[in-house]
Amino acid sequence: MIQGTVNGAAQRFDGPVNVRQVLEKLSMAGKKVAVERNGEIVPRSLHQEVMIENGDQLEIVVAVGGG
Amino acid sequence: MSDPLVIAGKSYASRLLIGTGKYRDFAETRAAVEASGAEIVTVAIRRTNIGQNANEPSLLEALPPSKFTYLPNTAGCYSAEDALRTLRLARELLDGHDLVKLEVLGDPHTLYPNMPETLKAAEQLVKEGFKVMVYCSDDPIQAQMLEAMGCVAVMPLASLIGSGMGILNPWNLQLVLEKAKVPVIVDAGVGTASDAAIAMELGCDGVLMNTAVAAAKKPVLMARAMKKAVEAGREAFLAGRMPKKLYSAAPSSPTEGKISSKAA
């Protein structure tokens, strides 16, 4: 089992997962989001390659209204 | 396009930049943006709500980036590091879009900018290839520093964010304007149309606002008023106003050819 946080909340994954699979699990696949893993950007082109490791901190963001 | 606003080599017909926060819904956001005529819209970058309805409408659908120039901001960041992370995420989110609004706040009550952190972040962002429009205090020296670092626009406050207090220190804005070679855009503090006009009459290159429109009783109507105010202020600036005098011994009507007073 792999444990990490996504947007500050704990998340568990049964087996090895990549960033794309995390997005799928959270119903965000195909949505316009950006992902940061442990403070570093994970480019969209690498979502299938970058694997989640224990203790990873993911941030998934979108654009919202702001001034 | 006559008299465009040129930022980082790109021309914009509108000198009004508008924020997309605090509206009732996306329909109102869109209507207000359209009424304002703004081409550049600021957006914030925030965590997705995990578990939210997957079909919930998104800002990107309401305001398609193909139609508007997005200006992702770092609102809510209190350190250079947070601002850098936010804008790197924004660039990734918006497919390499590199025009950004940097703001690093110093205090959650006043939202006054933290200039040392702003300068630190600006320097790094320019190194990373961002085109940085920077919210700053109206200190002419620090505005020059930001320009020297390579920021593409300096955006001094007219008064505090969300205060609607208007142009509190036109003298400092003039000092900033006197030295700046990049566009100077008043960001924050505008409350109503006359404030926007005053900023433009001073010679500012543009005005950025959010609350003045979104918190008006009729936001779409206020957006239209702001469009006119920015245009009127710009034209008045270009026209060159008459000098102020305490009184004038030169009335507008001829002093010659008046009928004579009736003989007593």
Image (cartoon, coloured by chain):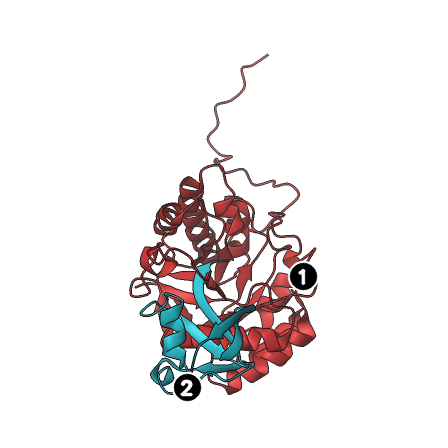
Chain colours: A cyan, B red
The mark found on residue B169 in the picture is none
Inspect the image, locate mark 2, and give the three-letter code of the amino acid beneath it: Val
Secondary structure of the residue carrying numbered label 1: loop
* Mark 1 burial class by Cα count in 10 Å: few <14, some 14-19, many 20+: some
Residue B25, position in %: x, y?
41, 46
Mark 2 or mark 1, whichever is nearer to me: 2
Residue B250, position in %: x, y?
56, 41
Q: Is residue B158 left or right of residue B12?
A: right
Q: Nearer the viewer, residue B177 or B103?
A: B103
From the viewer's perspective, is residue B220 above or below residue B81?
above
Secondary structure of the residue carrying numbered label 2: loop
Inspect the image, locate mark 1, and give the three-letter code of the amino acid beneath it: Tyr
Say which chain tag 2 marks: A
* Mark 2 burial class by Cα count in 10 Å: few <14, some 14-19, many 20+: some
Asked if marks 2 and 1 touch (Cβ < 8 Å), the reply is no
Please state the total of marks drawn on the protein image. Answer: 2
Residue that appears at 54% across and 81% down: A38
Q: Nearer the viewer, residue B79 or B181?
A: B79
Residue that sits furthest to the top in the current view: B264
Q: Nearer the viewer, residue B13 or A51?
A: A51
Quarter assignment of residue B107: bottom right
From the viewer's perspective, is residue B86 above or below residue B129?
above
Residue hosting label 2: A50
Residue B226 in view here: yes
Q: CA distance from mark 2 to mark 1?
A: 39 Å
Residue hosting label 1: B112
Residue B148 in view here: no
Say which chain tag 1 marks: B
Residue that appears at 66% across and 62% down: B172
Q: Is residue B71 left or right of residue B242?
A: left
Residue B156, position in %: x, y?
59, 64
From the viewer's perspective, is residue B71 above or below residue B197?
below
